[in-house]
Image (cartoon, helix red, strand yellow):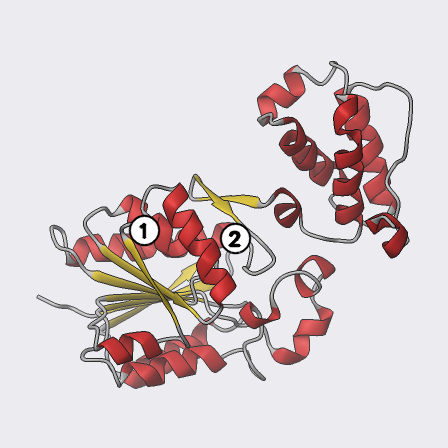
Amino acid sequence: MSDAAHSGVSGPGPIAAMTIREAWLQASSFLRDRGVEDGETSAEWLLQHLLGLNRSEFFMRWSEAFPEERRERWNRMLERRARKEPVQYITGEQEFYGLPFRVTPAVLIPRPETELLVEKVIEAGRRLWPNGSPLVADIGCGSGAISVTIAVKCSSWNMTATDISADAIEVARGNARSNGVGERVTFFRGDLLEAYIGERLAIDILVSNPPYIESGDIPHLQPEVGLHEPVLALDGGADGLLFYRRILEQLDRLPNPPAVIGFELGQGQAREVADLLRDRGYWDELVIVPDLAGIERHVIGLRNIS
């Protein structure tokens, strides 16, 4: 029995020969009818992936005939999207900071706002170690978007990453290899900083996008997130701040606290997380960084090491 028969959702079905544009229009209508809000965009992304075309090639060629041999696969992709599965899990890929990343349901889909966290951490690290090789730790690395990007952009830095999920580590390792830094990122499997504590590693830069959704909000997330992205990477405890507290408590067991710490946060959490960092007393400066929508999205702690 097909996936569609199991789910009660069916694709647009067999139709006469059509152009790429007609396939897009039909798919857009099908997805809208199934309650997918971004039906036109989803159909465009999926069709580009199916045909191996970038956006400009897609529009240049959309009067050409849709390849009939790909019809069955196309219908399966649309059925999955109609069940609110994210496009990125269907295509298996997501760009981050201009780099390609493989994504699976074992990892969160990298978000554009996290690019700003990477940018700020790199900026701070280059200021403190202009010619040095700081040890960087990406805590809860997921797909490896943060750690792999930093390794690519900062070739002299010592990049490490950890996650509690073996499946996530596997995805991240693959992304490190495919982006040419497979030998330059050391991965640990463990709970937050436990691997670093066990190895007595002195972290210079700590960066993390930990779970920060309040447990009670998980059932109310949009279906693309709540039904498909890993709960392990979403649930931040009763108030969403569980993992910030745990990371900061574990810092006391390291040889030294990091000179730079960067966290991504949920909406409305910046002031509380900044207070948690301030209470530790390790950093001379705390900066709250808004994202492009003006939401206070990141907190950066900096200590003068001169």
Mark 1, secondary structure of its residue: helix
Q: Is residue 2 visible?
A: yes
Mark 2 vs mark 1: give the one in front. Answer: 1
Identify the residue position indicated by label 2 in the image: 111
Image-based side of 244 in relation to 108, left or right: left
Q: Quadrant of residue 77?
A: top right
The answer to whether 30 is drawn above or below residue 172 in the figure is above
Q: Is residue 144 visible?
A: no
Q: Quadrant of residue 282?
A: bottom left
The foreground one among 290 and 250 is 250
The answer to whether 238 is drawn above or below residue 105 in the figure is below
Identify the residue position indicated by label 1 in the image: 150
Q: Quadrant of residue 19?
A: top right
The foreground one among 290 and 54 is 54
Image quarter of the C terminus: bottom left
Q: Measuring 87% from the left and 55% from the top, which residue is drawn there?
A: 6
Image-based side of 265 in relation to 232, left or right: left
Q: Measuring 52% from the left and 53% from the top, which residue is drawn there?
A: 111
Identify the mark nearer the N-term, 2 or 1.
2
Q: Measuring 40% from the left and 74% from the top, which residue is drawn there?
A: 190
Image-based side of 147 in relation to 199, left or right: right
- How crowded is the residue under tag 2: few (<14 C-alpha within 10 Å), some, or many (20+)? few
- Residue 11, percent from left and from top: 86, 40
Mark 2, secondary structure of its residue: loop
Q: Residue furthest front?
A: 1
